[in-house]
């Protein structure tokens, strides 16, 4: 990729999450940022001052810029469909923050539009492309626990309304969007971090059986209860492979981002599927039969990674939000689909919506979308990598 021309990009949406992308964007020579736009001009200019970049005067100017091949859609979730559609219609490839859309039909329409225009569509989250996910996935492919039967994933983020969330301010001054967290819901906001791992490693989901609820009625966060999504959800996912996974999301229970896969010959798990260097562990079948659950038999696996990229990061452990855009840039230059393909992202969106909508809709949902299995990262496709 280093011998190829960088892909020109622009960002739409200059809120809290955009600052997170800028934390690591400049270490990726594959991406060349030409400018940003936000419908809130004050937000655009505050972001541009902080990061020393150009501001487009309007959306039309951004979409008309021939230097821009790829747009990062970092807008409010309710605007994802409209903005992504406008970008695709203008002939731009799109990388969208999660979810692709707030309705499955709209997400399907985006995938169809991208295919009709010969464009690539991808989306967040991209933790699947990081070191812990790729390490666990390789151990699974290598048969380290035999046939996988069952997975447990937690996406609990603590009692949100008791936290100092109003003090969470991005580098350019944008506040953390707590209203979205309540109205969109923590399931749609966070389930994807675990779902991407589960469906990549265990295969597409065939059926979702879900329950969701509003447990904390008085959050005192400025959003009426009737506008709040569920603050707790739990779902059993039946994968086409025959495996079953259970995913729990909440902004009520204490912080817990563990993900465990159990198989015929043992179990693999990661302590925190959010963190970019979280340990990955394995325990064999014999150890699982030990008298103590806490017996010191768990093996810590070597964390795979691109040695050059790790060295370039100088030991920093920031979450790299640009892993997805970088892989999409590779696909634009080399041809083919990104690892987080349009159909893969559609599947994640459809499953997450089925869980989130259990608050007001059917608890059992047959999932229609399917996808081609994503390939592992090159440095995780064989033995090697960095410790």
Image (cartoon, rainbow, N blue to C red):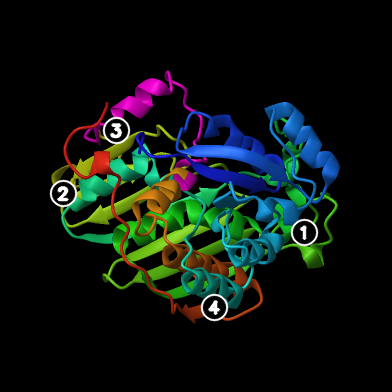
Q: Closer to the observer: label 1 or label 2?
A: 2
Q: Closer to the observer: label 4 or label 1?
A: 4
The reply to whether discs 1 and 3 touch (Cβ–Cβ < 8 Å) is: no
Residue 69: x and y, percent?
Answer: 54, 51
First in sequence, mark 2 or 4: give its number: 2
Give the structural element (helix, strand or loop) at label 1. loop
Residue 142 numbered tag: 2
Q: Which residue is mark 3?
A: 303
Residue 52: x and y, percent?
Answer: 70, 28
Q: Quick check: can you spot residue 292? A: no
Q: Which residues, given as a range, are shown in magenta?
A: 296-325
- Name the foreground residue: 347 vs 162: 347
Crowding near the residue tagged with mark 1, few <14, some 14–19, many ≥20 C-alpha atoms within 10 Å: few
Q: Which residue is mark 4?
A: 363
Residue 121 within the magenta-colored segment of the rendering: no
The reply to whether discs 4 and 3 touch (Cβ–Cβ < 8 Å) is: no
Residue 92: x and y, percent?
Answer: 56, 58
User: Magenta region, mostly helix, strand or loop?
Assistant: loop
Vertical placement of residue 120 versus 136, above or below: below
Q: Quick check: can you spot residue 280? A: yes
Rounded to the nearest whole Å, what is the CA distance between mark 1 and mark 3? 42 Å
Q: Closer to the observer: label 1 or label 3?
A: 3
Q: Which residue is mark 1?
A: 217
């Amino acid at each position: 990729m280093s011998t190829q021309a960088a892909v020109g990009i622009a960002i739409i949406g200059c809120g809290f999450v955009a600052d997170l992308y800028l934390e690591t964007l400049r270490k990726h020579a594959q991406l060349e940022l030409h400018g940003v736009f936000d419908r809130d001009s004050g937000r655009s200019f505050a972001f541009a001052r902080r990061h020393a970049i150009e501001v487009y005067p309007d959306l039309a100017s951004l979409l008309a810029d021939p230097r821009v091949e790829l747009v990062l859609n970092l807008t409010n979730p309710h605007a994802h469909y409209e903005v992504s559609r406008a970008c695709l219609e203008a002939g731009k490839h799109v990388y969208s923050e999660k979810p692709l859309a707030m309705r499955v039909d709209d997400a399907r329409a985006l995938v169809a539009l991208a295919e009709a225009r010969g464009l690539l569509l991808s989306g967040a989250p991209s933790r699947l492309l990081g070191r812990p996910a790729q390490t666990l996935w390789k151990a699974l492919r290598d048969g380290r626990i035999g046939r996988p039967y069952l997975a447990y994933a937690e996406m609990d983020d603590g009692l949100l309304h008791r936290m100092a969330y109003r003090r969470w301010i991005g580098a350019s001054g944008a506040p953390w969007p707590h209203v979205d967290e309540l109205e969109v819901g923590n399931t749609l906001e966070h389930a994807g971090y675990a779902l991407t791992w589960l469906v990549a490693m265990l295969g597409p989901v065939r059926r979702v059986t879900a329950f969701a609820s509003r447990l904390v009625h008085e959050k005192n966060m400025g959003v009426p209860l009737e506008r709040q999504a569920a603050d707790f959800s739990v779902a059993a996912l039946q994968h086409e492979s025959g495996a079953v996974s259970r995913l729990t999301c909440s902004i009520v229970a204490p912080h817990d981002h563990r993900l465990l896969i159990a198989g015929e010959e043992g179990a693999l798990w990661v302590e925190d599927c959010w963190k970019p260097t979280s340990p990955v562990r394995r325990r064999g079948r014999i150890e699982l039969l030990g008298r103590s659950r806490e017996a010191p038999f768990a093996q810590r696996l070597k964390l795979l990674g691109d040695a050059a990229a790790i060295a370039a990061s100088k030991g920093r452990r920031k979450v790299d939000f640009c892993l997805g855009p970088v892989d999409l840039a590779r696909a634009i230059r080399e041809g083919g689909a990104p690892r987080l393909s349009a159909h893969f992202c559609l599947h994640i969106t459809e499953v997450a919506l089925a869980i989130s909508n259990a608050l007001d809709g059917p608890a059992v949902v047959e999932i229609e979308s399917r996808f081609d299995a994503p390939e592992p990262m090159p440095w995780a496709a064989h033995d090697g990598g960095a410790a």
